[in-house]
Image: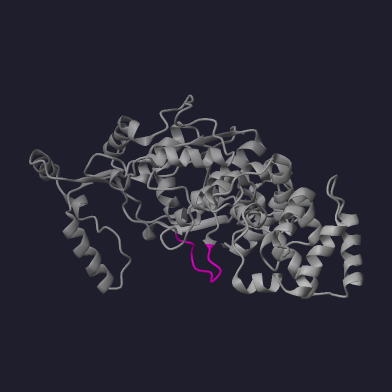
Amino acid sequence: MNPVRVRFAPSPTGYLHIGGLRTALYDFLFARHSGGTFILRIEDTDRSRYVEGAVENLIASLHSLDIHFDEGPGIGGDFGPYIQSQRLELYQREAARLLGSGHAYRCFCSPETLNQMRQEQQQRGEFVKYDRRCLALSEAGIEAKLANNEPHVLRLKMPDNRVFSFDDLIRGHVEMDAAQSDDQVLIKSDGFPTYHLAAVVDDHYMRISHVIRGEEWLSSTPKHIWLHECLGWQTPLWVHLPLILNPDRSKLSKRMNDVSVESYLQKGYLKEALLNFVALLGWHGADDRETYSLDELCAEFSLQRVSKSGAVFDLAKLDWMNGWYLRNLPLDEVVERSLPWFETEGLSLPEPATLARIVAAARERCTLLPEIAAYARMFLCPAELSEQDRDFLHSEDSQRVLRWFQSQLPRSGGVDPAAIDSIVKNGISELGLKGKAYYTPLRLALIHQSHGPELPATFVILGWEEIHRRLGRELRS
């Protein structure tokens, strides 16, 4: 059996999107699970859609998620170059072979001619495809057009009567009639290859064993099988992943949805949660667990457990998963990753022990990293009290509560939650107050809001010195 070699082959047209991430992740997991090779190949032959800096952004996004390729731009390999615009001579050579064997032909039709042809076919209710009018050109006619430098493309001549059959590792046996396939353009008028020729040529020369790609490419498989046959090459194994769907079952579109991987990271989603969530968009483990580390995914992953049916992108599930990781990752990691958002909030960092206590309390209640910094504000930089809250705080009962606590709370030493809980219960009995009348004055004095964490958690975070300072600040003489 040939060694496993898989490729992620994006076009540099913008940011890495969720669909692309899933393909890259499945390639990566399959390669790691099989002891194979994961390749990054940049398919940049459509120059009209090229976006400056997109390659660098894409590679940075993959690395930020700990998806590292074994061969590709920047690190090389035995089958490079790994950027298609640097391989044009190879595509031209193989295209010339197809032309010489009669499996390809020149087409001189203008865009206007092609558009009119398609409109007429649609009006007649026919399958829209090139009608091969240039296939009837004589050699002399072709030479004359070439001599006049008339723009033209090179098309693949598909067989007239053939049913293509192949085995897809997810969908099983598939049969597709060649009549439903167009004579695909292989070389454009600018001399650059189309995706179809370049991908097949590169897959062969890079010795790709499995082509893992989205379901939208299923209809192109007969063309790719035919190209392999015409060039005398063995086909790889085909793996077509299910669509990613919106909750209403419509296709998740990068043009209509916020599906940029970078945007999710910028919003404060954790890489562990994002990878875990994306891995489950079509795949499930043997025990139907919900949470996996990247190492566990590498160990568990198999193409046999990828579903045929579309996978729903459920943002509520991603939020739940992100909250789970916030609570379960090592505390020091969560502290470190939350730091940029403290800067965004304009908050000065407290000493490390206090910061750790704040994050420990916050992550039990937060879903995203920036929410931790927002939660911390009540301890580090409380908002100004409203006039209504200040009037309440200065009422007779509220002042009694503050004085009693100032007299009962220690001035130094460690903060023991159990002891605090006992003091709080004693205060209810001694003061004869409860509910809002009892708890709200303390919260307003300590964090300038009437709702917040349990009092023991607040005391642990602030410490005795700061507690007494804040209580004393709100006591009237």
Left or right relative to 440: residue 4 = left
Height in image: 422 above or below 299?
below
x and y percent of residue 135 in the render?
A: 21, 50
Left or right relative to 98: residue 416 = right
Height in image: 450 above or below 293?
below
The segment highlighted magenta reads: 245-253
Image point 33% across, 66% down: which residue?
127
User: In the rendered picture of this protein, how many numbered marks are placed on residues?
Assistant: 0
Specify whether residue 286 is in view.
no
Viewer-side residue, 233 vs 248:
248
x and y percent of residue 194 in the render?
A: 33, 45
Q: Is residue 360 magenta?
A: no
Q: Picture quarter containing residue 193?
A: top left
x and y percent of residue 15 in the render?
A: 43, 48
Quadrant (top left, top right, bottom left, bottom right) of the N terminus: top right
Q: Residue furthest top?
A: 78
Viewer-side residue, 468 vs 312:
468
Image point 62% across, 64% down: which residue?
316
